[in-house]
Image: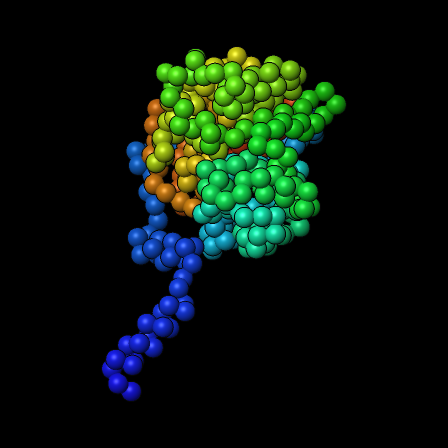
Amino acid sequence: MKRSHALFFSVVALALAVPSSAQIGSFLHSLVGDNKVYNERPVPPPVIPPKDSALKYVQFLALGDFGTGGDAQKEVAAAMAKKATEEPVTFIMSTGDNIYERGVSSVTDPQWNEKFEGIYAEPSLHVPFYAVLGNHDYGRDTEAQIEYTAVSSHWKMPDYYYTFRIPVDDSTAIQFFCIDTTPMAKVDPSGVPTLPESSPIRRQAQWLDSTLAASNARWKIVVGHHTIFSGGDHGDNPGLQALLVPIMKTHRVDVYLCGHDHDLQLIGPIDGITYVVSGAGGKRRDTTWRDNTLFAATNYGFNFFRVSARDMLIEYLDRSDTVRFAYQIVK
């Protein structure tokens, strides 16, 4: 065969075998190795307090930035399934970026099976999967992620922002306030006081304010995609600090749970609010410790929550299902 012909067929073969973005990412990570945690400080071995037989508990998992369809997402999902088999969970909470890189085009988009249904298929994970939108979910049809609630047996996203309550015992509940931070993430902090009443950003902030005010839940968790405080690549968000923190402080929110930075972090409490970053469900990135950081890690993972009327336990697990850190909030 002539050299030019051999070159032609080699190029054709390469063109027919173009790797996916997930495969490219896995290959690059194999070259550069694990991501780093900078300014890392020693943390004590995780101490998991035993359950009190006199109390009732609600358990759930949290993860974000997962929907790649790649090996890392599958590894994290397997670890989640193992954890949920050992410690059954009532539901799973997503912090957004559910389908990379640009969301879905419809409720029948094949990505639903490739990056969600087919990956979280183990029986221990077949529980309600509540989700919020991330910035990568805005590339195609965001409404399709809301509409998919009526199609899937466990996907739950009834609107762009919504609330739900989970009873813990006869007199105790956890209430979740799920918000859409993408429209708010680039707000100018100096312009927050003068946002017009008709602004979608103002309307969502007012909804959060009034819904929190009406809540009598013992535990209040606000879930969004974007970080408010973070030592990761995206860092602090001054606009969200100006827009959301005063509302959360006023109504004594316990936890702000988010993703966006592809790592795991625990920051705070700051003015009584604990900030949990859970954005390592399928992607990873360097991170660092900052003021008020209690824990930071990279290279994939998720969170496990155990909540009673008395306390909230937050575990940080890596993709091998190893508990790396545990933190307890006592009421």
Q: Which residue occupies the extreme right position in the image?
A: 170
Residue at 47%, 16% (x, y): give it.
196
Residue at 43%, 23% (x, y): give it.
240
91 versus 206 height, above or below: below
Q: Which residue occupies the extreme bottom position in the image?
A: 1
Q: Nearer the viewer, residue 91 or 148?
A: 148
The percent position of residue 154, horizontal first and vertical second, equals 66, 44
Q: Nearer the viewer, residue 321 or 168?
A: 168
The percent position of residue 186, horizontal first and vertical second, equals 40, 27
Q: Nearer the viewer, residue 12 or 66?
A: 12
14 versus 307 height, above or below: below
The percent position of residue 153, horizontal first and vertical second, equals 69, 46
Residue at 63%, 41% (x, y): give it.
147
Q: Which residue occupies the extreme left position in the image?
A: 3
Would residue 49 be visible to someone looking at this image? no
Quarter of the figure that contains the N terminus: bottom left
The percent position of residue 183, horizontal first and vertical second, equals 47, 29
Q: Is residue 158 left or right of residue 319?
A: right
Residue at 40%, 62% (x, y): give it.
19
Would residue 184 be visible to someone looking at this image? yes
Question: Quarter-wise, where is residue 170 in the image?
Answer: top right
Q: Nearer the viewer, residue 217 or 41?
A: 217
7 versus 81 height, above or below: below
Count of labels in the image: 0
Quarter of the figure that contains the C terminus: top right
